[in-house]
Image (cartoon, rainbow, N blue to C red):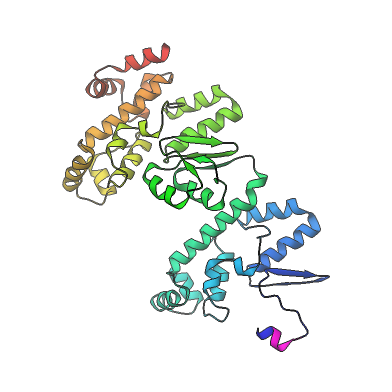
């Protein structure tokens, strides 16, 4: 408005990110200058170079619409607002560490005063604002880069980003089972199958929890390099290649822990770190509880004491590795955290009622 008032001969279009009129280019805020620079790169070197540059910057190439659609957060800050320029700075420097202290220093305020004034103007805390802009940038990168990549894949709740970007609209997908109800509520246009380990829909792949990402990665290896390479990779990882059934059969112990249970994430961590020392004291520290309190609460939720739960997960992993054709019992025992084959044999007898050789015979059959 001020520009139009001072220079009435200029046709100001305030809802544009940038405008190219003959040899003259103008842009909106500082980060809109990146859009302008990418447009110049496209004009001089071609769209492909500009697109690759945008992907390197994690920036949305040729964002559709005008400046009014540029960012919900930038809309919240009025043009004359105290933090409009700061928000523009944040969006242009998302790779950097953007702590409250650093942003407060940039705004020439104490952290406490900055947080209070920022929240009053923008409507979000500084940390939440930075997080929102990072999600926006990631979503924009997905939207702008999806057409030029061979595959798009997500692990665990990464499916939220794909759904936000519209890449899952009308497709079957999966995510971590503890997020399934929320996911269905937020994205009714996605056909969620919560009991699957991973799902492939054309070039879009989604997987369940973090360890299910290994299943997805093995499937990608099989597609690119063949089944034998994927199977050998699984054996190196002591991992069951192409686990039969769905996510609901993934682990009896993970099923025991309800989606909102206190130790669901801890059990997932244990399964992903079976080689490590997993003493009650270590797990209690990770759960931010005393060993005694942890043991009592864990047993009440899971139905087993912590040591037995770890043993059951180790047996499950070892059994899966042996059934999928692992070449060395000693190697499986070491990588699943048993230490030696004799300890593994005793655990197998205790948990399954049969020795490891039963799983080996099943693989041979």
Rendered location of residue 241, percent (x, y): 46, 26
Q: Residue at x 31, y 40 (%)?
A: 267
Residue 174: give x, y in percent of width and height. 46, 40
Q: Quadrant of residue 109?
A: bottom left
Q: Which of 214/132 is in front?
A: 132
Identify the residue at image location x=67%, y=64%: 34
Magenta portion: prevailing SS class: helix
Q: Position of residue 360 (x, y in %)?
A: 37, 15
On whether residue 279 falls in the magenta region, the answer is: no
Q: Nearer the viewer, residue 194 or 292?
A: 194
Q: Quadrant of residue 334?
A: top left
Decide: is 70 above or below 359: below
Of 304 and 191, nearer the camera is 191
Q: Quadrant of the N terminus?
A: bottom right
Left or right side of 64 for 283: left
What count of labels does the image hold? 0
Task: Return the residue found at the far right.
Answer: 22
Residue at (40% x, 77% y) in the render: 116
**Residue 99 in view here:** no
Q: Position of residue 17 (x, y in %)?
A: 67, 68
Highlighted range, magenta: 4-8
Q: Is residue 153 visible?
A: yes
For residue 279, side relative to residue 31 (left or right): left
The one nearer the camera, 189 or 221, is 189
- Above or below for 147 versus 17: above
Q: Residue at x 45, y 52 (%)?
A: 186
* Image position of 321 (left or right of 74): left
Residue 7 magenta: yes
Q: Quadrant of the C terminus?
A: top left
């Amino acid at each position: 408005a001020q520009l139009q008032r001072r220079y009435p001969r200029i046709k100001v279009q305030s809802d544009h990110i940038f405008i190219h009129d003959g040899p003259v280019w103008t842009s909106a805020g500082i980060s809109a200058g990146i859009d302008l620079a990418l447009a110049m790169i496209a004009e001089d070197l071609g769209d492909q170079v500009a697109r690759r540059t945008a992907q390197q910057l994690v920036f949305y190439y040729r964002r559709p619409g005008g400046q009014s659609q540029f960012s919900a957060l930038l809309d919240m800050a009025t043009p004359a607002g105290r933090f409009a320029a700061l928000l523009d700075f944040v969006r242009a420097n998302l790779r950097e560490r953007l702590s409250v202290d650093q942003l407060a220093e940039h705004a020439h305020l104490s952290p406490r005063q900055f947080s209070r004034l920022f929240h009053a103007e923008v409507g979000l805390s500084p940390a939440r604002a930075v997080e929102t802009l990072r999600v926006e940038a990631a979503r924009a990168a997905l939207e702008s880069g999806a057409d030029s990549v061979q595959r798009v894949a997500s692990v665990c709740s990464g499916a939220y980003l794909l759904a936000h970007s519209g890449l899952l609209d009308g497709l079957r997908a999966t995510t971590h089972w503890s997020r399934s109800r929320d996911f269905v509520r937020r994205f009714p246009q996605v056909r969620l199958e919560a009991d699957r380990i991973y799902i492939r829909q054309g070039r879009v792949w989604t997987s369940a929890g973090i360890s299910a990402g290994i299943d997805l990665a093995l499937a990608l290896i099989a597609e690119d390099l063949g089944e034998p390479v994927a199977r050998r990779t699984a054996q190196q990882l002591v991992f069951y290649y192409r686990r039969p059934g769905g996510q609901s059969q993934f682990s009896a112990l993970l099923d025991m822990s309800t989606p909102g249970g206190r130790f669901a994430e801890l059990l997932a961590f244990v399964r992903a770190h079976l080689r490590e020392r997993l003493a009650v004291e270590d797990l209690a520290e990770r759960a931010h509880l005393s060993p005694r309190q942890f043991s009592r609460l864990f047993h009440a939720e899971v139905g087993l004491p912590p040591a037995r739960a770890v043993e059951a997960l180790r047996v499950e992993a070892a059994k899966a590795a042996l059934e999928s054709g692992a070449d060395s019992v000693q190697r499986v025992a070491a990588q699943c955290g048993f230490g030696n084959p004799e300890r593994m044999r005793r655990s197998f007898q205790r948990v399954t009622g049969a020795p490891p050789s039963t799983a080996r015979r099943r693989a041979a059959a």
